[in-house]
Structure formats: C-alpha cells, structure tokens
Image: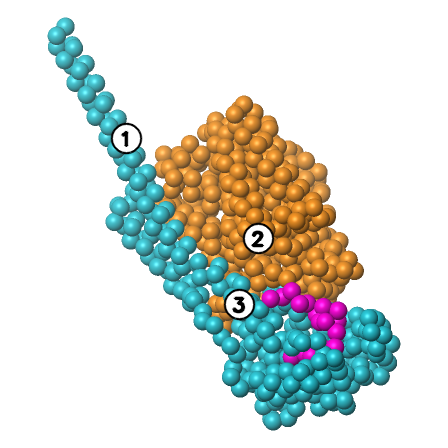
Amino acid sequence: MLSNANNTAKSILTPFNLITGAIVLVGLVLTLMRFTGGLARVSNLTDYNPWGLWIGLDLLTGVALAAGGFVSSAAVYIFGLKKYHAAVRPAILTAFLGYALVVVALNYDVGIPWRLPYPFIMQQGTTSVLFEVGLCVFLYLTVLFLEFSPAALEWLGMRKLRNLVHRLTVVLTILGVILSTLHQSSLGALFLIAPSKLHPLWYSSYLPVYFFISAIIAGLSMVLFEGAFCHHFFADKLGEAHRQEKDQIALGFGKAASWVLAGYFAIKVFGISADNNWHYLLTGYGLWYLVELLGFVLLPCLLYATGVRGRRLTLIRWTAGWTVLGIIINRLNICIIAFNWHLPASERYFPHWMEIGISVFLLTCGLIVFKFIVSRMPVLYSHPEYKETH
Amino acid sequence: MSISRRKFLGWVSAAGSASLISTTAHGARKHFKGYPDCYGILYDSGFCIGCRQCEEACNAVNKLSAPVKPFDDLSVLNQKRRTTAKALTVVNRYENKKENKSPVFIKLQCNHCLEPACASACFVKAFKKTKEGSVVYDPSVCVGCRYCMIACPFEIPAYEYDEPYTPRVMKCTMCHDLIKENKLPACVEACPMGALKFGKRNALIKYARERISKFPDRYIDHIYGEHEMGGTSWLYISSLPFKDVGMREDLGITPAPELTAGALGAVPVVASLWTVLLTGIYAINRRKEKLAEREKKEAVEAAGRDKKKVSLYE
C-alpha cells in the first residue's frame, strides 16, 4: 500500500491515505472519549492491573525498539565503523519518532497528563526508578531531536545552524549511549519492586541487565527490519550509497545481533540457575518461558549466524522481524502476561479494544510522520551539498 | 569533523558531569527501623464479628459516596473483596472449616509500612510516611502514573479510573488528621467489639505477644506486620494461618526501597564509566585513523620518490 505513496500528487485517494485516514478518524474519536470520559471509558485497567497495553506495548516495547538510534550512532561515530554510516539517519529518525510516540502515549495513560513535568518542577522523587526513567527519556528525546535536526536543517537550507549541530555529533552520541544505558535498563528495574507479583521466571535481580542487552538486540534488528521496509516502500528515495551499503549493513548488524543474542541467552540461563528456578520450567508459565527463550532468543541467534555465514540476506531480514516480535513478547510478558500471575483469571487483564485502537492510532500517526519526513528530508539518501562532511 | 581534541574533551567532561549531578541524589541509603514513637493499630481477629461498622465509619470520615448495598447488609461478605477507590477498608470472611468453628474475619486497608513501597516508587513524592505512623498522600501533585499500585505488595491503593479530570489514588490515611487532634481513627472508634486497638506500635507488639502466649490455642504464633516488608504500622493476629485468610506470607522481610536501591545506586557508576570508556574508544579510533592516513601519505610519497629514482636511472 505504501508503494503507491509517490502517486499522492496525482490523487489524494490512495489506499495508504484511505486506510490511515480511517484509522486517524477513529483514533481522534477515541482520544476525545479518553480525555472527556476518563480512563475507565476506554480501558480495562483495574486496581489490580494499573498498567496495561499502553505501558507494556507503547512504553516498554516502544523504547526498546527505538534503541537502533543509539546502537547505530555509537557503532559509526564512536567505534569508527564508518561503513555502516547509511544506517544512522533512518535509525535516528525512527528512534526520535519512537520516543516522541512514547511521550504521546504516556499522555493517554497517566491520570493527569498536564502534570507530567511535575516530577521535575514540583518535587523530585529521586528514590523512584520511574523518576530516573522519566528524566533520561526526557533528556534523550532532546538529544535525539538534536541528532536528527541536521537532516531537517539540510532540507530547510539552513547551512550555518546545520554545521553547528553537526559539530556536536560525537558529544551527542556519547550522551545518547549513557542516557540509553540508564533508561533502557531502568525500564527493567521498574519491576524490581514487585517480586511478589511478577512470575519468578521473569523476575530477576538481573532485570536491568536483561532489558539493556535485549534493547541492543531490538535496536540492531529494528535497523535491519526497517531497512527492508524502506527498501520495499521507499525504494525511489534510497540514495546510491545507501543502496550499496545495504547488504553490508545487513551482514554486519546480523552478525552483531547473533553475538548479542548468544550473550543474552547465556545470561538468561545464568539467571535461572542463580535463582534456582529450573523447577518452574515444567509448569504452564515455564513452557511459555521456554517458547520465549528458545523460540525468540536461541532460534534467531542461530538463524542470524546461518544467514551471515551463507550471506543469505533474505533470511537475515526475516530473522530481524522475528527477533522484533520476540522483544514485543518479552516486554508484554513482563508487564502483562507474567505480571499478577498469582491472581485468579477473573482478576487478570486483557486490553479493551479501544486501548488497542489508540495504540494502533498512535503507531499510524508515527508512520504518517515517518513517510512525510523520508519523502522530503535527506534521510535515506545523502544531501548532495553535504556529502563530504558526513 | 573539525574540532580540536581539547575542545572535544571539554565538551565530554561537561556532559559527563552534568549527567552525574542529576543522578548523585540516589546514593546509598541506611537501614531505617521506623519512627521510634510511631503509632499503629492492632487488628485482633479473635474479637471481630464482621459487622462492617468500621467500613461505614471509614466511608463517612472520608466523605465517600454511599455503596449500592447498605453497610448492615452482610451478604456482601459472601464475596472476597479488595479495597477500591470507594471503599478504603473492607472486611472479608473466611470459613474455619478445619475446626468447624465460627468464621474468621480479616479487615483490609493500607498497612502503613514503615518503609512504604508506594512512597519509594512515587516519582513526585506524593506519598509520605509521617512520624505519627500514617502514610499520607498528596493528590495535588499526583500525576497518576499508578506505579505506587504496581509497587504495593499488599495491593491496596486504588484509582479513580472513572474520574476524567482529577483522578486520585485512594487509600486509607489511618485518619492522620484525627490522630493529630489526639482522636482515634474512625474505624477504631467505631468498632463495637474492641477488635481494633490503637497505640504506640512497640507497645502493640508487646501486647499482641502477650495475647498470643496467654491464649496459644486461640492464635497462631505470628504477628502479621511485625516484619513483613520491613514491618508495617498495622498489625494483625489471627486464629488461622494468614495464608488461609487471604494474606500473603511469602512477601519476605525486605523493605521495598531496598529492592530498587541497587539499580539506582548503579546510575552514577554507569554514567561516569561510560563517559570515560566511550571517550577513550573514540579517541583511540581517531588516533588510529590519523596514523593510517599518515602511513598512507608516507607510502604514497615513498612510492613517488622511488619512481623518480627509477626514472633517473633510466
């Protein structure tokens, strides 16, 4: 449907516009309902289940999948892997839009959204992991905005300002890695306070480490997944350098993802041993845990390795999608599925269709903005006037 | 990139120290055994008859809306209930099947932990453990993130989900205002059986122990709340094991703030180590690149000289 995107000049009634238009329309109605009727009007959240889909999917998964920004910029600007340069801008854009969406989604989820700055301007709850998450996400959103701004400034032709920001690249990258390490891991640390509610197989004092490592996996996989996506739907926007570097990026990032997945698998097994949780593996939750661990960690690790070895690019791209799915499952497990496992089924949570609707609406808005930007700004290609300075 | 190394290092150290300043507040924390003279309430299930008068008094003092079924309708007890935004305390009934005795009642409300999970989890400090013993909540700063509800091991705080503009977290305040006026909390005042005893927490623990040792056949030897989650201001003694009356015995004795202290303590370490490491890696890579460029240049020049020599001989 997106391949018709370049026909927009001819007709507004493209399938892409019709579908997204319908979703946006429904989303606006749901938004009105949420902000006039309260959370109870649109969600299935209860006193037992204060966090639902918007936290599990939009916040936890959204932030993890936006990790491509810091992973690829660190690889290129700090570790000097310049051959992956073409991956940076699309990844930074996805990260920026991802984090922006997280903040928008939070406005739906918290009870009194206009008070979101209160923890910083009224009283600082420094004993709270959430305070750290909030501060880092806010700072990192600013960093991502600056990191992405050169593309917008090139588009607008503001050369001086663009060069000024461009000079900050390395500092911003280092800040980005620090802030990402802190809040990616802290999202896992949020659950450390609830050992009596999260299933022991998912609860571990290593949760912050798991979240950070799996965010790197998510970031690497998202770069590949989104590369394939852009190659398919925005082929006409791809620059020559991007076309040439694409396969190299797939092989390099696939290899990295395979190694990190192997490490992640190892520390997960180590975590089970450390807490001696082996006996849980044969329960219902245990089998589901094994699906996650073997099917979405070990399997993609092997598939990536096979793909890189045989230079099978299609396999690498499918594996990237599978790994992304695995990250979504992991975050939903921790926030929703294995959370409150001790409660009877009648007290458990399943999202209301309107919660799902709002999540889809927000994702669609992100997609529209993404399309707007890559159709106009030098993201998938290098701006001819700035080629040498990249 | 056309920045000098000195300029670059200056920026990085500025960025590093900025991120440190914002995070040093987390630091280490010392063990806290509760305010020495804090009050508490002992619930003695041996006296409770499940009349729900405490619920009624609580409803009135907190100016909550009247429930669908009146408080003297005891059929409500047929179902297991939890605290909600409209009922800050609830009494549940548990049949005493084993000994075929009369049923056991348990009154649920905020336990007012000595080191509350909700207060530790709140990113805007809306919860506060007062020196009187109550854990109080300030709705004027609450953002409504509901992390307190995730954190509370007793599953007590409730939320006004149906309130569109100013929803609040709702939980028992141990009638903090009344305590400050030297009055009894509403539920204690209302109990016709004396099942709720208000006093200094230390004195209540002593009293509870005496009760248990005086009537070993009437109570199990456990004061719930003495150590659970680091100790709570609300204490319970019961004739049935607590796990049989809907109270979790697997919570442990670690105060909730300690569960996240380690992760928060790592923040300055991560921030400072990463700054040094990443700057170092960047600097090494720049140096390598420069050396490679110089070598390339020298090789080209050398090749040029050789070529000249060759042409000279020719």
**x, y percent for residue A229:** 59, 35
Identify which residue, A102 or B13, lies in the foreground.
Answer: B13
Q: Work out whether residue B233 can be spotted.
A: yes
The chain carrying label 3 is B
Left or right, A62 with reference to B240? left
State the residue at coordinates (73%, 86%).
B195
Boundaries of the magenta span: B235-252
Q: Which mark is residue A275?
A: 2
User: Viewer-nearest of labels 1 and 3?
Assistant: 3
Q: Work out whether residue B117 can be spotted.
A: no
Q: Colour of chain A?
A: orange
Q: Which residue is mark 1?
A: B292
Residues packed near mark 2 inside 10 Å, few (<14), some (14 to 19) or many (20 plus): few
Mark 2 to mark 1: distance in Å?
Answer: 49 Å
Q: Which mark is residue B257?
A: 3
Q: Colour of chain B?
A: cyan
The image shows residue A340, relative to residue A218, as above or below, that is below
Identify which residue, A10 or A242, lies in the foreground.
Answer: A242
Left or right, A264 with reference to B89? left
